[in-house]
Image (cartoon, rainbow, N blue to C red):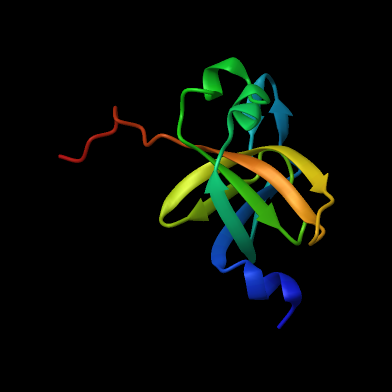
Amino acid sequence: MSLFQTFFTDKIEVTTYIDSKYVKGVWTKGLETKKTLDAFVHPCSGKDLLSLPEGERVKQTLKIYTDKKLKDSDIICIREEKYKIYNVENWVGSLPCFHSVGVKIEKDKSKREA
């Protein structure tokens, strides 16, 4: 067990889309890959919120520390909720890791089950 795993107890599932691109003006998701990482999750600070695009600041957010680098626009699943990743930074502290902000992806309320 690594030192990181000793302190970071939440498991997150990370979904990455490889080779996503626009095709004739329509965004096309690439190959989906999934992996599980250990993470330490906290509420965001005001400084973290200011780093987000304006429309994202009013949504539920989490500050996420991982020992593996995430990518902007990765999707993570934690505690059965999905979050889009923003602002991945190398964080140098007592335990070197990566810091990112997750913004909750709201469920589409227009698609109601009959």
Left or right, 53 with reference to 87: left
Q: Is residue 70 visible?
A: no
**Relative to 37, residue 47 above or below:** above
Q: Position of residue 20 (x, y in %)?
A: 71, 38
Point 76% across, 60% down: residue: 68
Q: Is residue 109 above or below residue 36?
A: above
Residue sitting at x 57%, y 60%: 13
Q: Quadrant of the C terminus?
A: top left
**71 over 8 or under it: above or below:** above
Name the residue rendered at 58%, 16% in the picture. Answer: 54
**Is 104 left, or right, of 13 in this rendering?**
left
The spot of residue 47 in percent (x, y) is 65, 28
Residue at x 64%, y 22% (from the top left corner): 50
Q: Residue furthest front?
A: 94
Question: Where in the figure is residue 4, as x and y percent of width and height?
Answer: 72, 70
Up/down of 93 relative to 86, above or below: below
Q: Quadrant of the N terminus?
A: bottom right
For the residue pair 24 and 18, the one nearer the viewer reads as 18
